[in-house]
Each structure stands twice: as C-alpha cells, then as structure tokens.
Image (cartoon, helix red, strand yellow):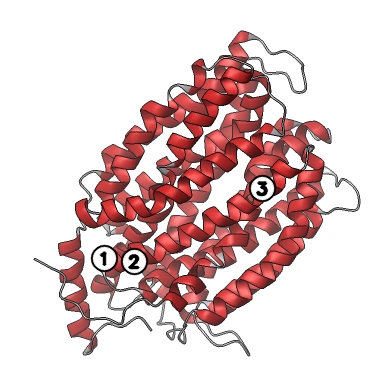
C-alpha cells in the first residue's frame, strides 16, 4: 500500500530554516561533551571525577525541564512572541548565551560549585531549544519520508556546526585557546542562526491545554508500546554514542600518545564523513524503511570501531585512527536523522489514541531518555578508568588503565549498539502503517494534512 496522504511539500525555505538553529546547539555540545571535562578537571585542577560528577548533576536538571518545556511548547503562548515552538527556542537561546559567556569566556576560573551552576544553565538552555525544535517535525512534515528529509537537513546543520567547532579547535594549539575561540564564535553564532532560522520556519499558535493534560500525556505514553521500544533503543544507542567523546581526549593522550591538538583533526575527519554519509542514509531509508536503515548503520559501525583498541601509539596509530574515524563517521548521519523521524511517527500514534497532538511532551520524554544516557556515560567513562588504575595527569598509565580506556572508548559502545539493533530491527510503525494512521487522522480532522 502506498502513501496516499496529500500535504504541502517541504520548501527550501522551511528546510533551511529548520536546519539553522541546530548549528550553534551542536557547536555548544562540543565543549560540553569533549573539552570541558578534561580542561576543568585536569588543566584547571578541579579533578576529573569531580567535574564528571558536576556534569552529571547538571544533566539531571533535564528531568525537570524537559516535561515542562514540552508541555509549554504544546499549549502555552508567550507574550509578544507568536507561535507554538518559536518563543521557547528564543528563551533557550538567551539562557545558553549566558552559560557560554560564563563557561567558555570566564574572567577567572570558577570554583566547582559555579562550574556546576553554569553547566546546568547550559543544559537548560539547550533543552529549551532542542525539545520545541524537535517537536516541530510532525508539525512541518506529515509523510513518512518527508520527516526523514526534514531531519536530514537538521542533521546537516548539526554536522556543519560541529565542523565549524573543530575547525576552530584545529587552529589553536591549546585547549584553553580552543575553548575561548568557541566561546567567541558561539556568542556571534547563536543569535544569528536562531533568529534567521525562526524567521524562515512557519509556526502556529499553541493548542489550548485540556484539563490534566500533563498527567494524561504520561498515562498515554505508558500504553504506547512503540514509544517505549524506540525510547529504550534510542537511550541505549545514546549511551553507546556518548562514551567515545567522553573518553576521546584521554584515549588520544595515553593510548595513542598524541598531542591534544590532534583531536580537532580526528573529529574534523569524522564529521566530514558524517556530512558525506547523511544523504546516503536518507536514500537507504526510502528503500528499506527508517528503522532498518538505522539498524544497518549501527551494524556497519560496530566491526570498524573494534579496531580502535589495537592501534599502536604514535604516527601509525594516528593515521589508523583517522581511517576508523572516517569510516564510522559515514554512519553517524543515520544516528542523528532517522530516530528523530521515527519519533514523529510515534507521535502520530499517540494523536490517534489521545485525540490531540502532544509532540512537545513526547519529544521531551525522548530527550529525558537521551539525557539519562548522556549523564550516565559522562559518569561511567571516568569512573571506569579510575577503577582500573587511571591516574590524572600522570605521564604514563598502567596497562590495565590503558585497556580500560580502550574498552570504554570502543568495546562497550559496540555491545550497547548491538542491544539497540535487537530492539529496533522489527519496529512496528512502517511506511504503510504510518500512512494508514495519517489517513485516519486526516478524516478525523475533516481536512487534508498540511505543513503549516
């Protein structure tokens, strides 16, 4: 059965506008996920484990913020700023810019409690951007494949923002200079990209909140089997994805014996490959389905990544690691694009059962799942290597510590990805099923679906 729903096509204006806010958010995620832990923990002397715990605490705020911002973006209008998603993205941008100034451009190194405060504000700002922005997908695109196309452009924005970050990292030799350069770039890029993106993307007024809508959204979610299946696979895969960047600088320093400035080159190659590979995964998803394409991408990355622990130190290890980074980078676009698109299909199922769209609330739940995985990975990585004898700032590490770094960086993520594949391979919402749901929703609304 083919998709028979009729809807306005996605225009270049919408595709570009939807992609732009992802650039600065991705660029901010690089220092938060890759640089700050080692810089504040080792270089500024706050302690690697202490900073890991501080970042874990900061990420926990998401479990309070996400349900709130999801509900707000579905049901609450903001004074003077029209739209359903737009006002909350603007608020998140303001919060993120304050955090950028304090974390990346501080007048003096903050104590641990202040670092925790500003990191918390950074994550709150990101969530006020990410949840409404992600929830825009089912508003803007109604068909199975259009949602993948929309998120392919969003992934392009994520990767481009990341590449710009690593270009800055590659230019400057020290981590302190890299962080300052990123801070200046974000102070300019956040207002520019977000304001332009929001001006290009159509938005509509929020729906009035029904009685007990926040409680009822949880009740409906509990009965939504595809939601929980996707959320679990998404969270497990997110944990697999966060362990490597958490331990990347440590792996490069001690296992490969390379200077810190090589990290920028390695990650630049990785994300260039991701940019090249993203359109391919959109093409694959149109032919085998989104969930199968995602599984194939994860399955492809696993055997390639398994070679990282046996790389030699020195120049040979550097070039071998570049090859691994390029090949695994080719699969990253599927991770960034396809689950977001599948989530929109699950929102359709919720609307079918609940009688109204609650995309903001549902994307908030997925964001919480990801946050738990990210927080866990950011804590597990450093504690794992410490448990095997890793000594901060030591010029030489024990063999057990080196194997723990390599295992946490590459082998544990492979195991987690295999679990995610097993959960996703037979995902029940296919293109045919999604088209059937859309036809029922269209009949119920008494009109044809449209983009906005």
Q: Is any atom of residue 70 visible in this view?
A: no
Label 3 or label 1, whichever lies nearer to me, is 3
Name the residue tied to disc 1: 144
Quadrant location of the N terminus in the rendered image:
bottom left
Q: CA distance from mark 3 to mark 1?
A: 35 Å
Badge 3 crowding class, 10 Å Cα cut-off, few under 14, some 14 to 19, many 20 or more, is some
Comes first in the chain, label 2 or label 3: 2
- Find numbered disc 2 in the image and state the secondary structure of the residue it sits on: helix
Disc 2 and disc 3 in contact, CB within 8 angstroms: no
- Find numbered disc 3 in the image and state the secondary structure of the residue it sits on: helix
Badge 2 crowding class, 10 Å Cα cut-off, few under 14, some 14 to 19, many 20 or more, is many
Look at 64% across and 41% down and name the residue there.
34
User: Residue 367's x, y, as percent?
Assistant: 48, 56
Disc 1 and disc 2 in contact, CB within 8 angstroms: yes
Where 156 falls versus 353 (above or below)?
Answer: above
Comes first in the chain, label 3 or label 1: 1
Q: CA distance from mark 2 to mark 3?
A: 30 Å
Label 2 or label 3, whichever lies nearer to me, is 3
User: Residue 355's x, y, as percent?
Assistant: 27, 78
Residue found at the very far top of the displayed protein: 399
Q: CA distance from mark 1 to mark 2?
A: 6 Å
Q: 354 or 45, which lies in front?
A: 45
Name the residue tied to disc 3: 167
Q: 446 or 298, which lies in front?
A: 298
Looking at the rendered structure, which numbered label has been put on residue 147?
2
């Amino acid at each position: 059965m083919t998709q028979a729903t009729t809807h306005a096509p996605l225009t270049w204006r919408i595709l570009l506008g939807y992609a732009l806010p992802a650039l600065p958010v991705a660029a901010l995620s690089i220092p938060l996920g890759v640089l700050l832990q080692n810089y504040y923990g080792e270089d500024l002397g706050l302690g690697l484990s202490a900073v890991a715990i501080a970042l874990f605490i900061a990420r926990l705020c998401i479990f309070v913020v996400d349900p709130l911002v999801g509900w707000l973006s579905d049901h609450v209008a903001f004074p003077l700023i029209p739209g359903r998603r737009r006002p909350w993205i603007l608020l998140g941008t303001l919060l993120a810019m304050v955090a950028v100034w304090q974390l990346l451009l501080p007048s003096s190194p903050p104590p641990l409690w202040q670092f925790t405060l500003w990191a918390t504000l950074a994550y709150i700002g990101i969530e006020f951007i990410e949840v409404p922005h992600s929830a825009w997908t089912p508003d803007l695109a109604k068909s199975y494949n259009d949602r993948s196309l929309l998120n392919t452009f969003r992934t392009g924005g994520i990767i481009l923002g990341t590449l710009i970050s690593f270009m800055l990292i590659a230019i400057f030799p020290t981590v302190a200079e890299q962080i300052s350069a990123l801070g200046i770039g974000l102070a300019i890029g956040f207002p520019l990209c977000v304001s332009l993106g929001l001006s290009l993307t159509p938005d509509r007024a929020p729906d009035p909140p029904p009685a007990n809508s926040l409680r009822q959204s949880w009740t409906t979610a509990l009965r939504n089997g595809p939601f929980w299946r996707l959320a679990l696979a998404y969270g497990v895969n997110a944990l697999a994805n966060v362990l490597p960047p958490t331990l990347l600088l440590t792996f490069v320093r001690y296992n490969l014996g390379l200077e810190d400035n090589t990290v920028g080159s390695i990650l630049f190659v990785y994300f260039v490959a991701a940019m090249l590979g993203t359109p391919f995964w959109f093409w694959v998803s149109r032919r085998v389905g989104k969930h199968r394409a995602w599984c194939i991408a994860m399955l492809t990355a696993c055997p390639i990544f398994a070679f990282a622990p046996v790389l030699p130190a020195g120049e040979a290890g550097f070039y071998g690691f570049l090859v691994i980074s390029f090949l695994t980078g080719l699969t990253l676009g599927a991770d960034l694009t396809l689950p977001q698109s599948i989530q929109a299909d699950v929102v359709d199922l919720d609307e079918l059962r609940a009688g109204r769209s609650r995309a903001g609330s549902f994307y908030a739940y997925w964001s919480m799942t990801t946050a738990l995985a990210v927080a866990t990975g950011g804590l597990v990585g450093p504690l794992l290597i410490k448990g095997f004898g890793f000594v901060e700032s030591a010029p030489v590490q024990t063999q057990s510590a080196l194997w723990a770094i390599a295992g946490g960086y590459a082998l544990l993520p492979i195991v987690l990805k295999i679990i995610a594949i097993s959960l996703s391979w037979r995902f029940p919402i296919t293109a045919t099923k999604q088209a059937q749901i859309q036809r029922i929703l269209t009949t119920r609304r008494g009109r044809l679906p449209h983009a906005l």
